């Protein structure tokens, strides 16, 4: 491990395969081995290789990693095998005095809900470039940072800005981002911020009623805590419609909400993908149509009816239908659209999937051709040097 005050790095190695992981921030970072424990344990489990850690590791974190291994192995017995963990030495605990409370903050529904819910306690918000925005996408990252700085200022909190390549490193070692990996990345960032924060809220992706094995989970996240930093999985008591209803009249949220995972033409929110549309429905159910400036005011009903639905999209349609009942919102047009998805024949959905693939095939082919041409040109340039 090496680093400066605001940057740390470590080499993760399995046999001859090595990856250099790097994390930086706009605040000083912890220089011990403890922040690397969670992501390293998962690499070791995936390859069934005992873990040797060079550097001091917090004793509570080591014990927690054993429990985290038990959870992950229980969920994924064939992919995640338990391994032995050995560290050079034990890290001396630090006092919580003078340190704040953080909340991971992507600008999405879950993070706005937790940030506003615990606003009296939270002192800092945390944005991670490299989590859901690729490190090569500086344009979207810059626009997101600008929006989240504004949202944090509106909420009266400083924004800690982190950059890490751990997602790429984990992918290189064969870890699945959603099932295995992203929770340990959050744990790493939490521990590397231990000099600033003693407790960090991790906004829940699912309500308790829909909880499934996942890389962030209330049965897992607490085990990535250390003597210095407590990790708290937050928000399982609320569905997505309930979360949006809780902040639908908050100006900071309505000016800066970011939910899109499709990012058509690198938009902040494309307003056309299933996730954008479901969020527009959440806002409508909350009685706040037109208040969110980062999403269209009008729902594209025809587009929604023609959208291919993954299992997550179908579950979200049911969640919105349930949310209408729970929040007492009567809207025949919205109910008909949601029931149209829930009652859609499987064959119709698969045909929509085929049409979607056909639509993106030319762009994908162009991308591959560009990459191949670039590689060929680089090889030719090297050959003539």
Image: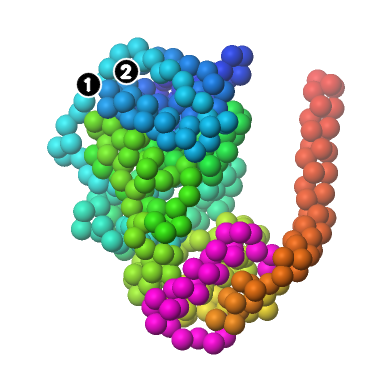
**Circle 2 is placed at which residue position?**
56
Dot 1: element: loop
State the mark number for residue 92: 1
Q: Residue 313 in magenta?
A: yes
Query: Is residue 4 placed above or below 334 in the rendered structure?
Result: above
Q: Main secondary structure of the magenta part?
A: helix
**Real-space Cα distance between discs 2 and 1?**
8 Å
Q: Is residue 168 visible?
A: no
Identified at 69% across, 65% down, the residue is 308
Q: Earlier in the sequence, mark 2 or mark 1?
A: 2
- Observer-nearest residue: 286 or 288? 286
In this picture, residue 232 sits left or right of residue 166: left
Identified at 39% across, 56% down, the residue is 208
Query: Is residue 262 placed above or below 375 in the rendered structure?
Result: below
Q: Is residue 274 visible?
A: yes
- Of the 4 image quadrants, the one containing the C terminus is top right
- Observer-nearest residue: 241 or 359? 241
In this picture, residue 49 sits left or right of residue 31: right
Cβ atoms under marks 2 and 1 closer than 8 Å: yes
For disc 2, the neighbor class at 10 Å (few under 14, some 14 to 19, many from 20) is some
- Which residues make up the magenta segment? 307-334
For disc 1, the neighbor class at 10 Å (few under 14, some 14 to 19, many from 20) is few
Q: Residue 150 in magenta?
A: no
């Amino acid at each position: 491990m090496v680093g400066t005050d605001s940057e740390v790095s470590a080499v993760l190695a399995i046999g001859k395969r090595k990856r250099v992981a790097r994390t930086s921030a706009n605040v000083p970072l912890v220089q011990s081995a403890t922040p690397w424990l969670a992501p390293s344990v998962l690499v070791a489990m995936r390859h069934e290789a005992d873990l040797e850690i060079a550097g001091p590791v917090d004793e509570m974190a080591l014990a927690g990693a054993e429990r985290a291994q038990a959870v992950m192995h229980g969920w994924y017995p064939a992919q995640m095998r338990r391994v032995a963990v050995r560290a050079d030495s034990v890290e001396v605990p630090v006092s919580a005095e003078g340190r704040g409370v953080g909340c991971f903050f992507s600008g999405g529904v879950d993070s706005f809900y937790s940030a506003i819910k615990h606003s009296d306690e939270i002192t800092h918000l945390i944005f991670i470039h490299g989590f859901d925005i690729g490190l090569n996408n500086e344009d979207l990252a810059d626009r997101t940072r600008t929006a989240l700085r504004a949202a944090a200022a509106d909420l009266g909190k400083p924004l800690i800005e982190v950059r890490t390549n751990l997602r790429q490193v984990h992918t290189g070692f064969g870890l699945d981002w959603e099932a295995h990996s992203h929770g340990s990345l959050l744990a790493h960032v939490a521990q590397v911020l231990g000099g600033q924060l003693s407790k960090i809220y991790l906004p829940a992706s699912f309500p308790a009623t829909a909880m499934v094995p996942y890389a962030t989970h209330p049965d897992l996240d607490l085990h990535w805590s250390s003597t210095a930093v407590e990790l708290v999985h937050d928000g399982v008591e609320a569905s997505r419609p309930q979360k949006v209803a809780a902040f639908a009249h908050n100006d900071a949220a309505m000016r800066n909400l970011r939910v899109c995972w499709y990012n058509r033409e690198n938009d902040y929110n494309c307003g056309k993908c299933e996730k954008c549309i479901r969020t527009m429905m959440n806002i409508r159910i909350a009685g706040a149509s037109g208040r969110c400036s980062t999403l269209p005011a009008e729902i594209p009903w025809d587009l929604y009816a023609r959208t291919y639905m993954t299992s997550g999209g179908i579950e979200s349609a049911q969640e919105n239908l349930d949310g209408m009942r729970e929040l007492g919102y009567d809207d025949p047009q919205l109910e008909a659209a949601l029931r149209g998805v829930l009652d859609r024949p499987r064959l119709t959905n698969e045909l929509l999937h085929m049409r979607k693939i056909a639509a993106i095939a030319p762009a994908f082919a162009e991308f591959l051709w560009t990459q191949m041409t670039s590689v060929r040109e680089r090889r030719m340039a090297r050959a003539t040097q």
